[in-house]
Amino acid sequence: MKVMMNTGRTVPQGESVERKHSPEYESAASVCFIHPVDMMVLGIEDGAHIRLSGSGGSVVLTAVASETVEQGSVFVPLGPFSNHIVSGETHCTGMPDFKSTMVEIIPTEDPVPSVAELMEALGGVRYAH
């Protein structure tokens, strides 16, 4: 299923942003809010794993049902997980398309990666504890 992805800060993600190695941050940043009707079309339930693929790549996230998200769109908190989906292209604005990236959702049994695994996949280093 192809949908429009929007990103932004959430309160739980923002509360733990200074502790990116913490389980609280990983839990808050590794979710994808999806309208329940779209979840029904995908054949998934709240808490299922999905692979979200966009112009910058793909990542496995936990699906969270949310009626505040419009059908045909999803919301992912800003951070290392959304950064794996959005292309680095800025169209000369200095800011990637965090508000208008078309993505594809595919149900998966794959595990959600840790922030450390995401950083290492990009050639970075794990956050210090």
Image: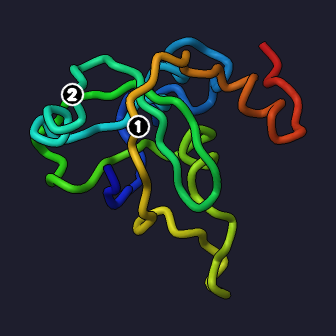
Q: At which x and y percent is residue 43?
A: 21, 28
Q: At which x and y percent is residue 12?
A: 39, 28
Q: Which residue does the image show at 49% across and 31% down from the upper left? A: 29
Of marks 1 and 2, which one's residue comes earlier in the chain?
2
Q: At which x and y percent is residue 61?
A: 46, 29
Q: At which x and y percent is residue 119?
A: 77, 33
Residue in front for this viewpoint, 47 or 77: 47
Residue in front for this viewpoint, 109 or 32: 109
Res 23 quadrant in image: top right
Amino acid of disc 1:
Ile
Res 92 quadrant in image: bottom right
Q: Secondary structure at mark 1?
A: strand
Q: Which residue does the image show at 48% across and 35% down from the upper left? A: 51
Residue 90 placement, left or right of 103? right
Crowding around mark 1 (Cα neighbors within 10 Å: few <14, some 14 to 19, many 20+) is: some
Q: Is residue 46 above or below residue 94?
A: above
Residue 24 placement, left or right of 120? left
Q: Which residue does the image show at 21% across and 20% down from the upper left? A: 45
* Residue on which the image places disc 1: 106
* Residue on which the image places disc 2: 43
Q: Is residue 4 above or below residue 48?
A: below
